[in-house]
Amino acid sequence: MATMPDRPRSPAAGSPLDAEDRRRRFPWLRLLRLHHWLKNVLLGVPFLTSQAWHRPGSGLLLGLAFLSLSLIASATYVLNDLADVEHDREHRAKRHRPLASGQIGTGAALAVAALLAASGLGLALRVGVPFLATMLVYGGLTTWYTRSLKREALIDVVALAGLWTLRLVAGAAAIGVALSAWLLSFGAFLFLSLSLAKRVAELEAFGGDADRPLPGRGYARRDLPALLAFGISTGVVSVLVLALFVDSTPAQLKYLHHERLWLACPALWLWLARIWLETARGRMHHDPLVFSLRDRASWVALAAIALVWAAALSPLGP
């Protein structure tokens, strides 16, 4: 009886060959970091906290603003990778990025970055001049960060937190609402904590001697205890700001059951505590956002916060 020829076997799941194959797929999508577009959902936070869903056209403006910021952000990611390409080649995980690995050339990357930036600014102008001004500040701060600030210890994480916070400012500018000082201060401390977690994770992944500097950054492994302390303390401050807001006059005026917002405090603390525990254990992804997207416990904590916010608005209950 004739026998069938053996089929070539694919690499076993989890094998080094399989992991390398996954890293080399879709280089342009990885270069533009489309998963980072999820960060731009923050544009909608002022819309929700100001309860502006009854404002005519606000949904369309938010959609255009989201697309505008996402295109501009992808352009800045490309430029950042171009500036960091030599340092990325020394990093255990980042050396597989499309530019660092040579999958995409410098000229093509620059052309795509220019096209994305021009398209994003054109959409920003359609949203409105205040939003366009915010996008120009975002682009300027990103460029400054890429060229110099990222090499300055502590200044770099303040700049990163500022870029996150600008998303809240941009969301308010897009729909023409005033940005609450409570939301601004809460976001600033929360984003500073996440930015510090990113740096600690990069140091943990870098390894090496205690005095060996992290390439392209202003830190060495000897700085880990201080960075851990700074990051955890700023995270706790963000929870404190939220707790103080619950009993504030604006909360009492905006929410039918403002006291229910207390339940968001332990949920937020648990999420931040998990991030920092995993960071201290050396198991944090170099981007806390990516970690949270893959972490079931983070999804549960964030969903709980959303449910508590909805319950505080709901007319149901005593």
Image: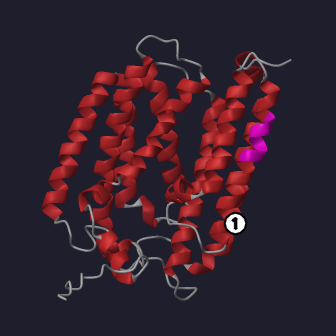
Residue range highlighted in magenta: 262-267
Q: 27 or 47, which is in the foreground? A: 27
Q: Is residue 253 found left or right of 107 in the rendered image?
A: right
Identified by mark 1, the residue type is: Leu
* Image-based side of 1 in relation to 100, left or right: left
Q: What residue do we see at 44% from left, 77% from top?
A: 14
User: Dividing the image into 4 quarters, which one contains the C terminus?
Assistant: top right
x then y, percent, for residue 272: 68, 54
Is residue 307 shown above or below 73? above
Residue 139 percent location from the top left of the image: 34, 44
Question: Residue placed farthest to the front in the image?
Answer: 1
Q: Which residue is mark 1?
A: 277
In the image, residue 304 lies at what x, y percent? 69, 41
Q: Residue placed at 68% from the left, 39% from the top?
A: 305
Q: Identify the residue at image location x=61%, y=74%.
A: 282
| 152 sits to left or right of 78 | right
- Which residue is drawn at the image coordinates 38% and 34% (left, top)? 66
Question: In x, y percent, where is residue 287?
Answer: 50, 61
Looking at the picture, does residue 79 appear above or below residue 202?
above
